[in-house]
Amino acid sequence: FKGVNKADKVWQLSFGSGFKCNSAVWVARKTFKDAHSCWVGFDTAKMWEDLNALTAQLTAEKAAKRAAAEAAAVAAATAGAENAVKRAAAAGKLAPAGSL
């Protein structure tokens, strides 16, 4: 990544075990033109490529789950209607098919 300019804000998040978490906003008091050595070799283009691929994968999974839920709802509604017709026919409330 790039360096940090004076007055830039950095959001620090920390997570612990269980419900322990914390956040802090740090404000740079001076400009740091050089990136920290821990970022040497970090490929931001690859990071964005990976994030976009994960987003596309999650979107596809959500769409598949939604389609499966809709298909199950349609199947349940169809089965319910068929059962209602069978119960009505068994009770003698419906004429057999072709008898009218």
Image (cartoon, helix red, strand yellow):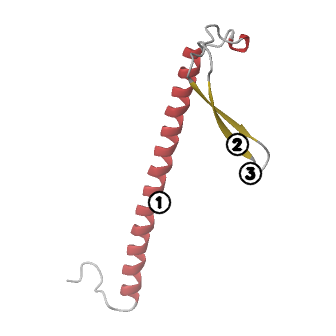
Residue pictured at 75% horizontal, 48% vertical = 20
On the image, numbered disc 1 is attached to which residue?
72
Q: Are marks 3 and 1 in contact (CB under 8 Å)?
A: no
Residue at image coords 44%, 62%: 73
What mark, if any, has residue 19 been given in the picture? 3
Quadrant occupied by the N terminus: top right
Q: Position of residue 33 (x, y in %)?
A: 61, 8
Q: Residue at x 56, y 16 (%)?
A: 5
Q: Which marked residue is nearer to the observer: mark 2 or mark 3?
A: 2
User: Which residue shows up at 66% across the image and 39% down it?
Assistant: 23
Q: What residue type is disc 2 on?
A: Asn
Q: Which residue sits furthest front?
A: 29
| Cα–Cα gap, marks 2 and 1 | 42 Å
Q: Nearer the viewer, residue 94 or 98?
A: 94
Q: Earlier in the sequence, mark 3 or mark 1?
A: 3
**N-terminal-most mark, 2 or 1:** 2
Q: Position of residue 64 (x, y in %)?
A: 48, 45
Q: Amino acid at mark 1?
A: Ala
Residue type pointed to by label 3: Phe
The local secondary structure at tag 1 comes to helix
In the image, is 12 to the left or to the right of 69? right
* Disc ID at residue 60: none
* Above or below for 34 versus 29: above
| Number of other residues with Cα within 10 Å of mark 3, as a class: few under 14, some 14 to 19, many 20 or more | few
Given residues 28 and 83, the one toward you in this image is 28
Secondary structure category for the residue under label 2: strand
Residue position marked by numbered label 2 in the rendering:
22
Which image quarter holds the C terminus? bottom left
Alpha carbon separation for disc pair 2 and 3: 10 Å
Residue 49 percent coordinates (x, y): 53, 21
Indicate which label's residue lies in the foreground, 2 or 1: 2
